[in-house]
Image: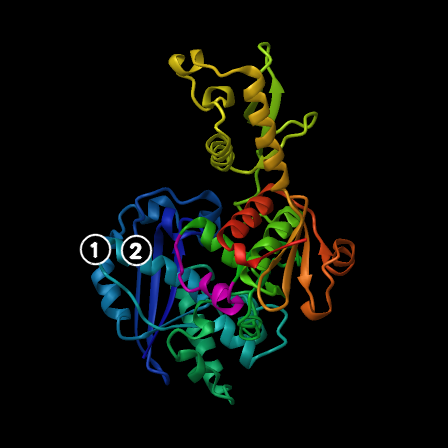
Amino acid sequence: MFAIVDIETTGGHASANGITEIAIVLHNGKEIEGKYQTLVNPLMPIQKYVQSLTGITDEMVSKAPLFSTVAPQIYNLLKDRVFVAHNVNFDYSFVKHQLQQEGFELNIAKLCTIRLARKIFPGLPKYGLATVCRELNIKINDRHRAAGDALATSKLFELLMENDKSGELRKMMKKRTIEQYIPPNLDETKIKHLPYSPGVYYFLNKKEKVIYVGKAKNLKKRVTSHFSNNKPSKQKQEFLREIYDIKFEICGSELMAAIFESIEIKRLWPVYNKSQKHFERSFGIYMFEDAKGFLRLGIDNKHRSLKPLATFHVMADAHRSMWKLVNEFELHPALCFLDKSEKIIKDLPDVTEYNQRLQKAVASFKSEQKTYLIKNGSSNFILVEEGKFFGMGTLNEENISYDVEQLKSILTAYPENEVLRSMIRNYAERYPNHVIEL
């Protein structure tokens, strides 16, 4: 029923490292049925610190079989059993990845003895293999060698079964239970207690520092999706090992969760968030008078010393707004730097008449920077004041007079950024029936 596995590797993640040794102890739940162990030639150098830790050198594996040679036998030993290991996701990610490279698809139930030990023997100082075995008087021969660690894990496994009074093993054997795939240092109750609500979630490391912020339409479903695959990449494996805790904030809607996520990423700057953690380049539409007396509009990088008519996070949004003005008020594309062909540049309109049209366009553009509420659900509101995001919260619509100052005193104010401004503007354009002008 069970295959208790331990591996030694050239490094910490499967996608760029290889297995140097593998041991499999076959166990029927009562006693050991068989053992398998072999060194493996990883076809790459073993890092020096790994050599000193395991004692496995490049010379030792140079004449060992390639994984491709032993893959059929390993697959046959594992395919009909429960994969058991101490920190199972690490060993499983390597073995599954290596087998996959050779055309074998391993898809079996997993059982983590770290998690099982936490449930059956709570209160131990740590749950690494060496500490658990020391605390439970299990002798380890050849520590950091696959055969020695696999045999010690099998003795631990037997002791866990003997002391399993509440059926924890049976619960964890159910395929795709939470315990099989969540990070080794995360208490599974943190996921079980997540709500099925929109919100923002935080992953914290051992020092309780936020390392990742995400948004969700459904907090439980989204958080679980982070752990539903066990990719062998370095980033994925390091990310999972870093997660010790989860916190969350419920938001009124998916839009409010997206807004709050952006605010929190800018505030906390988590190490594993990549999006929105960059220099926030923004663009502005500016008006100036040229040497011929024409009032002109142009798109440029946003300048601190100049006030733009409007700012944009994406250049395409700025161009779209500019073309909208050109088409509605018959502005000259060349005088807005949208068409630079020589024929059009020579065919210019009367200065006075053109400037009047442009002034009307600017007045119309400014009038669009309105103060309004976005109603996002029955009681969720987002306030935009003169085109800028002010804040959001819940309101009892029946008792609100829609006075701006009153709204500002009730809603929670947040710092604005260009991502938010673009997000809110796009939402208002898509759902004009949700907009309440003030």
**Does 134 sit above or below residue 166?**
above
When asked about the image quadrant of residue 54, the answer is bottom left
* Residue 271 falls inside the magenta stretch: no
Residue type of the residue flagged with mark 2 = Gln
Where disc 2 sits, the SS reads helix
Where disc 1 sits, the SS reads helix
Give whichever of discs 1 and 2 has the lower sequence position: 1
Q: Mark 2, residues whose alpha carbon is within 10 Å: few (<14), some, or many (≥20)?
A: many
When asked about the image quadrant of residue 255, the answer is bottom right
Along the horizontal axis of the image, is 351 left or right of 18? right
When asked about the image quadrant of residue 382, the answer is bottom right
Residue 269 at x, y percent in the picture: 63, 47
Residue 50 at x, y percent in the picture: 46, 49
Along the horizontal axis of the image, is 40 left or right of 311? left
Residue type of the residue flagged with mark 1 = Thr
Q: Which residue is drawn at 68% across and 26% down?
A: 306
Q: Mark 1, residues whose alpha carbon is within 10 Å: few (<14), some, or many (≥20)?
A: few
What residue is shown with label 2?
Answer: 98
Residue 304 at x, y percent in the picture: 68, 28
Q: Are marks 1 and 2 in contact (CB under 8 Å)?
A: no
Q: Which residue is drawn at 48% across and 28% down?
A: 330
**Stretch of the chain drawn in magenta:** 217-232
* Residue 219 falls inside the magenta stretch: yes
What residue is shown with label 1?
Answer: 69
